[in-house]
Structure formats: C-alpha cells, structure tokens
Amino acid sequence: MVYRMKPAGRDSLKNRNIVVTRPAHQAESFCRMLEHAGANALRCPLLNISATPKTPSFARLRAELASFDLLIFNSPNAANFGLPQLEPQRRLQGRVKIAAIGAKTAHAIAGLGYSVDIVPATGFDSESLLELPILEKVGGMKIAILRGSGGRELAGSVLRSRGAEVSYIQVYERQPPSKEQFEQIEQLLLHNRSDAVAITSGEAFLALWSGIGPRLCHLLNQSTFVFGSRRIADVARSKGLCSPIAVAADPSDEAMFAALLEWAAGA
C-alpha cells in the first residue's frame, strides 16, 4: 500500500512515535523538527559512519590533484570526510571543478569554504547529476568520485561510457550497528510501538532488515515506512517488506518531515 498525499497540519504528528534511523551525527535536526510538531522521535541509528583509513587511491588523488578536472562528492559525508583530508592547504579552489550530487552536499561543501561548480537544480542522486548538460561531454576528462563504502557504480559507469577517466575514492565507511547497539534498538522498539519508520538510504534499510528478530519484524510490519526515494522503497519491497509505504520527494529532513505530516493526516 502506498499512501496518497494530501495537505496536512503540523498537529497531525502529535503523540506519534517516529523511528529515526539516520546516523547519530546527522539525526538531531530532524528529531527536533519532529519533537517540535509533538511527535516522539525514537533515535535508532542504523549506520555508523567513520573515516576510511588512507588508501593508495586517496594518496594518488592528493599527490596528483592538479591533474584532475573534476571532483564529484556523492553525499554530505563524502564532503565532510574527504575535503579536509584532501586539501588542508586549500590549493584546490580554482584548479579543479567541484560537483555535488545534490543541494545538501553542496551546502556541506560550501560550509567547508569551497565553491560548488556543478549541482543539479533538482534531484539528489546520480541520475540527476548525469542529466546535466555539462556532464554530457566529458571525453578525456579525469574525474574522481568521492564516496562511502558500498556506493552505487552508476555515475562512474556512465561517465566512462562518455569517455572520461574515472577513479572512485572511498573516504568514509558505513557499518551496521554492533550487536550491543542492535540490542538497544530492539529494546527501544519493543517497548515503544512505532507508528512510522523514516529511512533515507538503502543501506540503512538493509541493516535493519538483516538485524531484526521475528518479534520485532512482526511489530515493524504494522508500522508505515517512509522512504527517502522510490529506489529505496523498491529495495524494501524486493526484500519482502509488506508494511504500508510512503515516499518522500527526496531524503532531506524537510522532505521527510513533509511526507510524515501528509501520511499522518491520512492515517
């Protein structure tokens, strides 16, 4: 079941228990939005984010930075973990163009003191970035894509097919919760009936789906899952999720909040 959205007031979330699955360091602004609307934010981070130890590919990128034409950052985490390590002397600006996969990533890059040359006006994924005319003719360009572990291969594959030389640079790692962390999450959810589960990445859903026990699975199947994109929802359905689903316009805090408001008004 997919909910049809309709206009909603902020009070539609009052006293609702919303499971927030963003990594702990990225969850608080969203939790505050929910709590300001009267909801109970159940903090259940499903991914641990940490810097990747320096790799040969990263060392090569740093040493040969001047030879690259474009750096693509595929998430705010990629910017926050990659830029400070890559360019502490700020030799980057004006020599290499910078692309962001979406507005949140562009904001993170700007917050570190850099200008963004390429960013989709709408959208937040590889498809939106690849549709930009400036990336249609990249033959002979040397491009680095900075990302986390287990990222999608679409951007690199398409850019190579257009004639670019592409390197993937992993700058952060995504790990599922530890056994102890998952036990804490299970206890929280077993003692607090969840009305909706907000999930903004396929990796977070897979961490949840592979880690929950039968009892918690039964309880969560009575909740509505609000996903940050149709692609994530499709992953969930392919794994057997049978809960009601709502899909936000994008994974941003604002879009997820709007989707939850609209779901709650119609529930």
Image (spheres, rainbow, N blue to C red):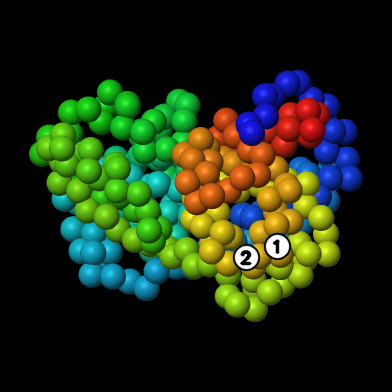
Q: Measured along the vertical axis of the image, is residue 25 above or below residue 236?
A: below
Front-lying residue, 107 or 246: 246
Q: Pointers 1 and 2 in contact (CB under 8 A)?
A: yes
Location of residue 88 with respect to 15 vertically, above or below: below
> How far from the left and from the top, in percent, is residue 239?
50, 51
Q: Residues within 10 Å of mark 1 (few under 14, many from 20)?
A: some
Residue drawn at 68 percent across, 74 percent down? 183
Between 226 and 216, which is closer to the camera in this rendering?
216
Residue 49 x, y percent position in the rendering: 51, 64
For badge 2, the amino acid type reads: Ile
Q: Judging from the image, what secondary structure is the residue with disc 2 in?
A: loop
Residue at numbered disc 1: 216
Residue 28 visible in this rendered orientation of the protein: no
| Secondary structure under the numbered disc 1 in the rendered image | helix
Residue 143, position as x, y percentages in the image: 22, 46
Amino acid type at image mark 1:
Leu
Q: Is residue 55 visible?
A: yes
The numbered disc on residue 10 is none
Label 2 sits on residue: 212
Question: What's the residue at 23%, 64% (across, down)?
Answer: 57
Question: Which quarter of the rendering shows the C terminus?
Answer: top right
Crowding around mark 2 (Cα neighbors within 10 Å: few <14, some 14 to 19, many 20+) is some
Q: Position of residue 156 (x, y in %)?
A: 25, 45
Quadrant where the N terminus sits is top right
Q: Residue at x 66, y 65 (%)?
A: 214
Residue name at image x 43 percent, y 65 percent: 173
